[in-house]
Every structure is written in structure tokens, then in C-alpha cells.
Amino acid sequence: MNHLVIIGNGISGITCARCVRKKSNRSITIISSESEFFFSRTALMYVYMGHMTFEHIKPYEDWFWTKNKIDLIHDHVEEVDFQNKQVRFKKSSLSYDQLVIATGSVSNKFGWPGQDLNGVQGLYGLQDLELMHRNTLNAKKAVIVGGGLIGIEMAEMLRSRTIEVTLLVRDSNFWGSVLPEEEGQIINRHILEHKISLKLSTELNEIKGNDAGNVKGVITQSGEYIEADFVGLTVGVSPNIDFLKKTELATDRGVLVNNHFETNLPDVYAIGDCAQFKIPLPDRKPVEQIWYTGKIHGATLAKTLCGERSEYHPGQWFNSAKFLDIEYQNYGIVPATLNTETHQWFYWQCKDAPKLIRIVFNKKDKVVQGFNCLGIRLRHEVCAQWLNEKRTIDYVMEYLPEANFDPEFYKQYEPEIVKKYNQQFGQQLKIRSKKGLFPSILKK
Amino acid sequence: MNQEALTSISLSNPHPENISLIQKFALAAIAMGLLLLFLSSFGIPISGNGLFLLLILLMIGGGALVYSFSYYLKKPAGIYNNDIWFSAWTSKGVIAWMIGIVMTGFYVILYFFPWLLDGLKKTFHPLSHILTGKDADHWFVYGSFYTFAIVIMGMRALVRYRHSRHQLIRTSSVIFFQLMFAYLLPHLLVLFQKPEFYFSYFWPLKYEYLFPSSLEKIITTGKGLGWFMIFWSLMMLLIATPVLTYFFGKRWYCSWVCGCGGLANTAGDPYRHLSDGKVNVANYWKNGTIVNLTDGSRDAIATAIYVK
């Protein structure tokens, strides 16, 4: 059990390698065809926008890998021979004792006519970024298909180069599959404020090209033609496991794993975007395509690889993002549409700024199930603690300032929020805590 | 992908924002203001005139404000760092290199060849007469430039960071402390024949404040006020600084009061991304070793002592 080979140098594979190295001296090799060194995928957009250079988005300097005796191979794995425990490149091969598959995702394409024209692309990896730079050198008008996280990132990127952007969104609001209506509407307005043309309830039908094979526009399902010399397809991602599909490794959408990241084959594991849980944890998706979950996957598997077989315990669900200028946070479970039989929600929206807080709770016992916030920061550890302790909505209202994580001197809205809650639910709750350093010291 | 292809990404933005007509006028005003300032350093006849100085400051300051306000106000409030690594001004490009040389050269002249600034001193005489009742020396010229930079670029920062109440209050604070306590008040004290005293600088930043010779001077020229100045120095040194630093870290001084931090957060704001994040550099800062090696900026030593 000596040689550990990890395919993929994204956050999952890298975290796994680092955590194994902390615990053992075994030899570790990481293979990537995408980039020589690990970089922060979520920061790719900032390289395009000139906020950072590629050097800056490498979380570790290049000497880090030699210093920690982690071998890096910059090559593409063509196939894996699970019988003989070998990964094969075009010209050579490499033996492993244990194999971790952490190959991430590829952008979805749904077989639209014209999806392979020049100037049509998704955005996931480094090659996509480079392609996007070339594709947009002379672009004036762009259409982005897909109103989700990557779609709005791509819109922001293109706007930084003064390219006109039209964003096609299938749902009736931005990110309608995840965000409740009010949140979606705040983001809709903000998108327009950034001079991005937003077409809601609009789906792509066809992409049109000219004789040279370059994109010239798109036709929506309602038949509208929109001119474009660049088309971004940002309709989600899927596990990047094509090279494993015809092997004895059990796969579905991703590589099938149990809660220990073990596949059907001994000594073969899968983590990150490309793994699919056979039995997902309650309220969690079978495929998790999130940076921090990839990190937890990697750290959990590292324990197993070092002899301490460990189960995946990601803790309370959370997520965060930034839609142009508006920060978004989510702790616990907040569905896009409420199951009104079992749950209730309370939301407060600021009258003169794009700020919102939504709290979902059980109808029966008033136990809080999740938080959403836009334009206001809540403190992660406090929200997670409240969720773990199964606090009621009344308790959360009374102690809301404790969770406030906005910078100093920001206006506090708790009195307004609690007032609205009291009016709506006929309560007379009073705020019992204060925000900040001193109150929390005193409390301890 | 090879490294070459990647560096091509950081070459430029092929579609930079257009400069509007108003911005062109603003830039023209800055350029002409700088030209007049340059001319005045040769001691041209008009350069002792107060209105001439006012005109120069208005052209440079007003131009800078109009340019940056019109850039930021047409965008929704938020953080814009677009193109900072593409621009030759902010990414160690050709222009930045030349600015670096000019700035360094200015400091060399200021410290070692101040007589070369005689023309500029003359330009600042009218202002110096109002504030101190004396002719301007090269330190008055330098202090005026410094304060001017903090005020103008501070106003730019107020617009740039208008989404953040924290930044609005903090930026106002550094402008206030520089303008009042590091510029107007010390000069006015001189006007009223009191010791030139900076209430916002403490020992060991102003280590000479507690030299026996300076104590004597402060007391003899300042009388009651002098005793208060010494009391103030001791209070800030022994009580305020340790207590505030314990609770808020060095930022209470560096980001809220200090002129050096003030300049970094205002005039230095377009360049803040250039600070090196490499592990060995970060370790030097963390261990406080490099702090003593930097440009003799004594505030850094002061905070290093408290922070350590």
C-alpha cells in the first residue's frame, strides 16, 4: 500500500493529498492535464477581469509540491487498467496501489443545433478561460444561456470588457431552481442595473452560425433572434468520467461511492464533483459540485487512506456566492418553493437597499431549518450552532444580532426585522443580545 | 495549456472603457496643473502669487476628482478592480515604472538636495504665510503635497467605497487626522509661537518627543500647553496605545489615525494589490523583521513594538 495516485488536481484531490502527507510519508502522485499546478477554480473569472494574474490564483507557490514530496504529473489519463492497477497516458503508464479519482466536471451541452460553432463555449476550467479570452477578443455582443452561478459570473466578466450581454434564463426569476421568488427578483433588478439584458422564462432553441463556422446569433424557443458573436453555455456541469465509462468501475452520472468514498473496486476511491453518492445524506444531493464539500471529501478520504476508515460528515449545509455586487449566503435548507403543509418562512426585505433575510421553520415546533440572506452577512458558526441545537424561530429572532457578521458601523436591521416578525406572527418578542466583540466576550 | 497562452490573458483588455469627454477635460486640467507646478519650480515671476498656487491645486485636485467621480458614479456601488493587472499604471508597467522613479527621485531630492526645491518653496510661500506666518521650507512643501494627496485621493476613496459604511467612516477619519492634526494644527501652533507639535504622533513614532532637550524646549516655549503636550504623549504611550492595540490590533492607528497609513489607503489605494503575498514575504512581515528594514517609516516600528 505505498503509492497513492490521485487523478485531478482540483480542490478535492489536492486537499486529499495534503491531508495524507500530514499523516504519512507514503509516495503521492497527482495527475492533471488541465494545469501543472493547483489553482483556485472559483477565482478564474478574476484573471479574465484583470483583478488578478494566474500566479495569484495558485493557493500554493510552486516550490510547495517538491518541499512536501508530492509528485505532479502534467499529462492526460487515457484509461485506467483496474486489473493491473495502472493508469495509462498516451505514451506511458503509472502503477498505483491506491487510486483516487477526483476529475471534477465538464460543462453541460444539451445537443442544441450549433453548439459546437466557433465562439460557443462553457466555462469550467483553465482551457475554457483561455478560449474565452480568444473568443471575445473581437466580440461586441454576447448571449449567455443559463441563469445560475456561472452564467452571472460570465456576464460580469464580459461586462468588464464592455461587451453587451444578454442573459437567457429558463425560470421566471434568476436561479429560480434554488432561490425563492423575492431573492430572485432582487437579483433580477441588480442584473439590469449592471446594464445586462435579462430575458426571463426564455430557453434556447438553436445557435446560428455563418459560413466560416462562427457563431452569429441564437434563436430562442419563442422564435426571437438575438445577434451574438459569443455564446456562453452555462447550464450546469456533469461529472467528468467519460474515460471510465466502459470499465468495471460502477458509474451512473458520476463514479458511484458509499459514504466512505469507496467505489465498487478495492483501493479505488472517488471524491469531489465526479463522485456520486449511492445513498446521499439526508437533504443533500447525490453529486455535490461545491468547493468546500470537495475539500471535506478530500480530508475525509485522507483519513481512510491513512488507516482510519472515516465516514463523510459534512455538517450543516451552507453555501455562499456573490451576484455582481450582492453577497448571498445560505445556511441549512431553504427551498425555492415552500412546502406549506409542513413549513413556514419569514422574510424581511430592506426598503431602500438590496438586502433580505429569510428564515424557514417547521410549522409544528417552530424549529428553524434554514437561512438565506442577500446583502447582509450572517455568522456561519452561530447559524450552524442554532441549526444543530434546533432553536426555534422565536429564539433566533431574540438573539439575531449575535449572528450579525456585517462589517463595523454597518446599519443594523434587527429591530426592523423583529418588528416585522412580531407584526406578522402576532408576537411581542424583544431583542436580547447585541452584535460585536464585547457582548460576546461578556457572555462567555 | 502552456504558460505562454496564459500570460497572453494578462496582456490587456481588448475593449477598455472609453474615456468620456468630461474625463478628457479633467485629465487635461491635471496635466496642465502639473505643467504649471513644474514651471513654478524654476521660480517663474508669478510663482509667489497665492492665486497661482490656488489655480494649480484646483486644476490638479479638481481634475482628479472629476475624473474619478465620473468613473465610479456611473457604476452601481460596489468593488471595481477591473483591469488593474492590465493597466500600465497599476501593474508594474511602463508608466508605473516611471512614476516609481519620479517619486523616489523626489524623496532623494527632499532629503539630500532640498535646495533644488527652492522654486517650489516660493510657490508655497503664500500658503505658508497664512498657516505659519513664515516662509515655506521644503518640509512645508512636502507636508502640503502629502496632505493634498490624502484629501483628494481620500475623496476618491469615499466615492469608490461608497457601498461600505465602514470605509466611509474610516477614510473620513484618516483625512481628518492628517488635515487637522498632522497639518493645520502644528502649523497654526507655530503661527501662535507654540511648539510645533503633532498630537497624532506618539513615542516611539516621534521618539525625539521624549528626549530631554525636546522636553525642555516644549516646556519653555509651550508653558502650560507644553505640559499638556507631555502629559498627552505619556498618556498615548502608556495607556491609550496598549489598550487600543490590545482590543483592535494595530489597525486602530495604521488605518484610522496615521498619516502613513492614510496615504497608503488613499493615494496608495490604486496600488494596494501590489503587496506581495508570497510566503517568505508574509513571514518577514509576520515576524516583524522586515518592518525594521523598510524605509525608516517609524510608525511601522512603533506598531511592531506594540504588536509583538
Image (cartoon, grey):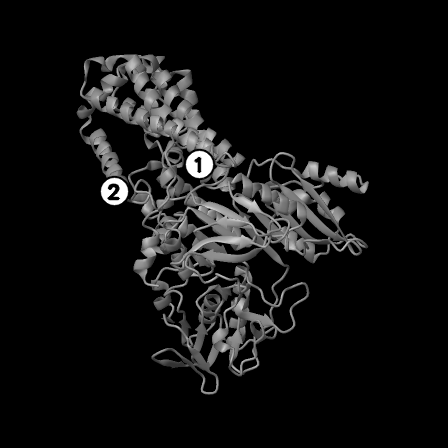
Under tag 1, what secondary structure?
A: loop
Compared across the picture, whether B212 is left or right of B225 comes to left
Q: Reading the chain from its start, which is encountered first: label 2 or label 1?
A: 2
Measure the C-alpha gap from mark 2 to mark 1: 30 Å
**Type of residue at label 2?**
Val
Q: Give the numbered dot on residue B255.
A: 1
**Type of residue at label 1?**
Ser
Q: Where B86 sits versus A94, above or below?
A: above
Q: Where B108 sits versus A161, above or below?
A: above
**Residue depicted at x 72% and y 44%:** A397
> Tag 2, which chain?
B
- Looking at the image, the residue that sits furthest to the front is A211
Under tag 2, what secondary structure?
A: helix
Residue B216 in the image: state x and y as whole percent: 33, 22
Residue B202 in the image: state x and y as whole percent: 39, 31
Residue A234 seen by the camera: no
Find residue A18 and report its image quarter. bottom left
Residue A1 in the image: state x and y as whole percent: 46, 82
Residue A139 seen by the camera: yes
Mark 2 in CB contact with mark 1 (< 8 angstroms)? no
> Tag 1, which chain?
B
| Label 2 sits on residue | B94
**Residue depicted at x 53% and y 72%:** A301
